[in-house]
Image (cartoon, rainbow, N blue to C red):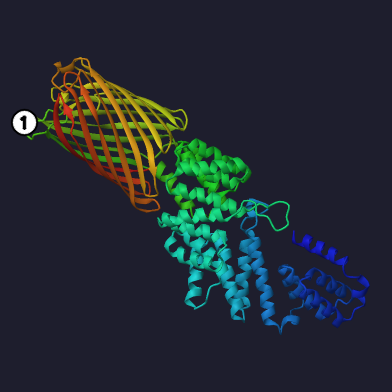
Amino acid sequence: MRPRVLCQALVFACLVVPLSNALAASDPEVRSQAEQLRGEDRPAEALLIVERRLAAAPDDDDAFRLRVLILTDLGSSRLAVEAMRQRPQLFADHERERERIEGDAVARAIGWGRVEPETPEARLAESRAALAELEELQRDAPRQTNWEATRLRVDALSALNHLQQHEAVVTGYQALLDDGIEVPAYILGTVGDSLLALRRPAEAIPVLESAIAHTPHDVNARILLGYAFIETERFDRALPLFEALAASQEAWPRQAGARSGYENWDRYSADLNHALAHSYANDNARADTMLQAQAGVGPNNPGLQAAYGAVQSRRLRPSAALERYEMALTMAPQDRDALAGRVGALTALDRIDEARDALTALQQAHPDDPRLDRVERDLERHRGVQATLSANRGRSRQRDGAGTSISPFGSRDGGWALEVRSPLIDDRWRVGVFAHEDWADFIDGRTRHRAAGVGTWYRQDRLGAWATLGAAGGASSGATWTLGADWRFNDAWRAGVELARNAQDTSLQARRLGIDADSATLTASYVPSDTFALQGRLSRLRYDDGNTRDQLGVDATQRLLTRPHLMIDGLLSAYTSRGSRGDTVGYFNPERDASANVGLRFDHITWRRYETAFQQRVELMAGPYWQRDAGTHWVPSLGYRHLWRRDGHELEYGVAWSRPVYDGLREQRVAFDVELRWGGAR
């Protein structure tokens, strides 16, 4: 591209400057004409005069030196350096000028290093070569002028940033500050970008604010500042910044007198990142709407498709996300966001073999990408050991505090459960062990039930299946087993079935009488997005005494309010059941009962730093409970929980209070539970 532009300029100049005059001119006259044209900002014409002079008098040193300077004016600093090195003696007394030209050449090479390469393999070749040349100048020809020495140090930061060597960028920037050097404003955005890549947003904010103070219209620096605010959880500053930035950019600006406007890619960047900012603030629905509109205008933009895919992933739509990532990669096979996002989407779809291949593609294309370690850890965590450890305690008593509780939980109850699954075998299988114990205190003493055994789990793409086998002990004994499967129809729908022998959810009141139960359960869920979920469960418990208990429950959740650190969901649940033998058995077994509850759930993200977060949850629910021959009573409940997340592992605990009614008698129940979840797989 550069030689062709130069040739066009020379052809243009041929039409302006008569050839005979240039060839006949003496050396002083050539310099005078050329300097005059340089002063009039007509370097191409000046270069033509000099070239003609050199064609007639190749040994004219003054013309040759002037040619080097004009090439620099034209931005052809690389050609200028090559020419300068042919006759270095001409610049021996012009140290500052020589160093400026060499610095221009290096700076231009660093800039060219960011241009889309001809082949993916050459993506970083020019930046590496430019950095090597810069370091050679620093080593073999130390700058004699402070500004040029500083300039090389500053320009090195740009090359290092493009090479993803962000630690070196920050170290180099700090060294400049330690030496008392006022760092030029043009590099501050680059330093801020590296600080963000290193996840040091608090340090990036003052650097980026300083960059914007010097160049208020630098759109990229303002976008980076917005992300620095997001990563320090300052959404109150980030969202207005992105909104103002988008509003400040016309989509099609028009120069005075122009017939039509021109494409403003800064407006595209502002709109894109404004939408993503809302997604990071948990408002994925709004981000979805904004990006969908943009995708309708520019469907062939790979960056836009990758961003839309990221939002679809956060909306719990991995298939839709994968489709967008693959669209982006069709247009830009080396797109970093699409390559990284594809790994996560395939993992969420339980296509682990493909996810590993996608990770390999990312590693080969962008081995120095800072996010690579996180993508690798996420996949390995999903493929690794999965474990759940839980415990609970509860207490039930009659409303007036007198008498004995008739709760199916007893007056006091508790239990614990442990399940450990192996790392993935052949990307599909896990084997593991389980154990659990439940107990409750009834009027005639404590009843315990425990079980332990082994299991195997299979999950690949749409299909999941599992089987466990164990032995029970305590109030009831014998073999216990489960056999189940589920199927994902699409991003929204999933259904499953499970059969269990000596089912864990058998009433302990029945177990104290030596009665066990088998169960069959159908489940279905409809979760079209992160803001709505509908789940249903139909089960039958068949007790040894001939009693069968059928239960149907439906739970729905709808997002009502989304803020960066607060989410409010509306809750609705309905339940009905029937027992074939009614109250003729020795345990709580309503012949018919039903309940309906509505409520609110408040989730407050109290503290968060990337994948580590502390969240508080409050749930309020109330509704009528009806039991045949016992009437209808309102049942309130209140729950308060803490949830800690770190690198995909979770610790959750909480306390719940309720006032349930059994056989027309109201009780008060307080319960505490805790659960540790290790590993990110479902």
Comparing 24 with 119, the one in front is 24
* Structural crowding at the residue carrying mark 1, measured as other residues with C-alpha within 10 Å and reported as few (<14), some (14–19) or many (≥20): few
Q: Residue farthest to the left?
A: 402
Q: Residue 354: x, y in percent?
A: 51, 38
Comparing 243 with 272, the one in front is 243
Residue 494, above or below 418: above
Q: Residue 661: x, y in percent?
A: 17, 28
Question: Would residue 504 be found to the left or right of residue 3 on screen?
Answer: left
Amino acid on which the number 1 mark rests in the picture: Gly
Q: Quadrant of the C terminus?
A: top left
Residue 9, above or below 399: below
Comparing 250 with 264, the one in front is 250
- Residue 375 in sight here: no
Q: Residue 651: x, y in percent?
A: 29, 46
Q: Residue 374: x, y in percent?
A: 45, 51
Which residue is identified by label 1?
403
- In terms of secondary structure, where does tag 1 sit? loop
Q: Quadrant of the N terminus?
A: bottom right
Comparing 589 with 212, the one in front is 212
Question: Would residue 4 be found to the left or right of residue 531 on screen?
Answer: right
Residue occupying image coordinates x 68% and y 52%: 261
